[in-house]
Image: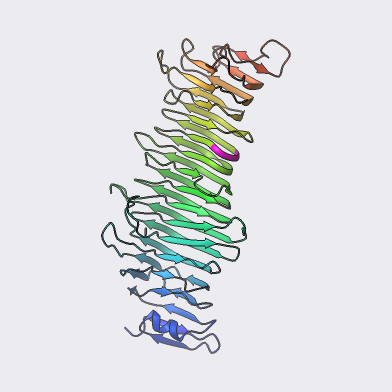
Amino acid sequence: MATEVALINKSSGDRVFYSTYAAARAAASMGDKIQIWANLTNQQILLKDRVDVWIAPGRIIDMGLAMPTIQDDGSVICNIYGYGIIKNSYNPSSTGDHYECIRITNSDSKVSIQCDYIEGIGRVYNSEIYANEGYSIFIEGLYSTQSFRLQCNKVLNKNNSAIVFRDYDAGTPENEVNINVKTVQSGISGVSGSGRTAVELAGKGFVNINEIICPVKGSCLIHTGGNIIANIIKLTTYDSSEPAVWVGDGDESQDLKLYFNEIKNLNTTSGDAVKVTQGIVNIIGRKIYSSKGLSLDLKENIVSAYFQCNEIISGTKGINIYNYSKAIIIQANFIEGSNGHYGVIYCFVRTNLVLRNAKIKNTSTSASTPYSICIYIYAGSFEQFFKFENVTIVTGNTSTGETLYLPVTGAEDPIVQNLGLFVNKYLGSAVNLQIGTAANYKYIQSSDVS
């Protein structure tokens, strides 16, 4: 019909109707506003500098051709609002290019989007095939002047990533990222092979999301660069090979402050909850849980890491640590694991760790190998540093299990400072505590510790 799109003149306020978005865009001048009143199919919303776009609530903008649904055209400053629905349904063969619902690639663009729902098809990921992935939202080239804001109820990609930020420049960190979404989902439950990383973050800014879910594959959140403050209530993945949250795979500029309620990996065979390999993290929330994998995997180029949680739990394994710089600090009421990864906390060769106010429990009662070990210190030629501040350690088997175990003799003795330690079995004979006034500076051992 001829009244699908209207153009409102900034100066006069006059409204002129057009049959296509392209026609209204061609007639628009700086400061004008385009209104979309009806569903549009196969009409690309190519943004124009300083021309805002209003989409009527519930109206669907759907692209079924080989192009993004919404795209910047050079450097643009533009607001899209009105709570419409933005989709890209172009779906060629699994090896062909797929396209984004929203694609912003100019390093000077400043785009703000308010909508109801964003849905992309995406390409089923295959590392051996080079083709466009078809993310739901793709923001590339984050430099000092770029800005992207999003307010939306749900962002979904059926086969690939939902929100992706790429090519962040740590040298010009003044760009702006502001995401406010109720639900983000990558993949469809019951559809084998669907899904990838739901949210890949880089840049400087704020993220507020109620829930991120990956029902088949992919990490909920990967942070690859920049300074992000995120409030994400619930993150759940079912992937056996990817953690629910990963800070890494980037430029080592990461500084993430994450506040949450639950982080879970519910895969029934493997899969970790949180992995940190780069940067600075402050992760504060209620519960971190992995059904069959590591609750925390902390290693490689970590600058600093602080965790404050009520529960850090692995159904079969525990926490893995290998860091060699500033101390990792874990403050948790309950840290639980089993005998699937040496111990509830496995410290490999180079570890600098502070444990505060924690009860560490190995739930395994096994009397044979692998034994019920709580903290396993694998010593080597490097100094290791441990500080226990009001820590309780409980093995599931006081006959064959260990509370604090150091199996390697002749290696560099770890420095273990005791500022309040309670155990249900004596420490391993190779462990020497520091701080105190008596031999192997006093700690409390009692069968009443449970």
- In this picture, which residue range is highlighted in magenta? 300-305
Residue found 59% across the figure and 49% down from its top:
253
Q: Quadrant of residue 410?
A: top right
Front-most of residues 285 and 145: 145
Q: Residue furthest left?
A: 93
Spot occupied by residue 192 in the image (x, y as percentages of width and height) = 28, 47
Spot occupied by residue 143 in the image (x, y as percentages of width and height) = 57, 62
Q: Is residue 74 left or right of residue 324?
A: left
Spot occupied by residue 114 in the image (x, y as percentages of width and height) = 48, 66
Quarter occupied by the N terminus: bottom left
Against 130, residue 71 (above or below) is: below
Spot occupied by residue 97 in the image (x, y as percentages of width and height) = 33, 62
Residue found 47% across the figure and 9% down from its top:
399
Against 248, residue 63 (above or below) is: below
Front-most of residues 256 and 284: 256
Marks counted in the figure total: 0
Q: Quadrant of residue 426?
A: top right
Q: Residue furthest right?
A: 437
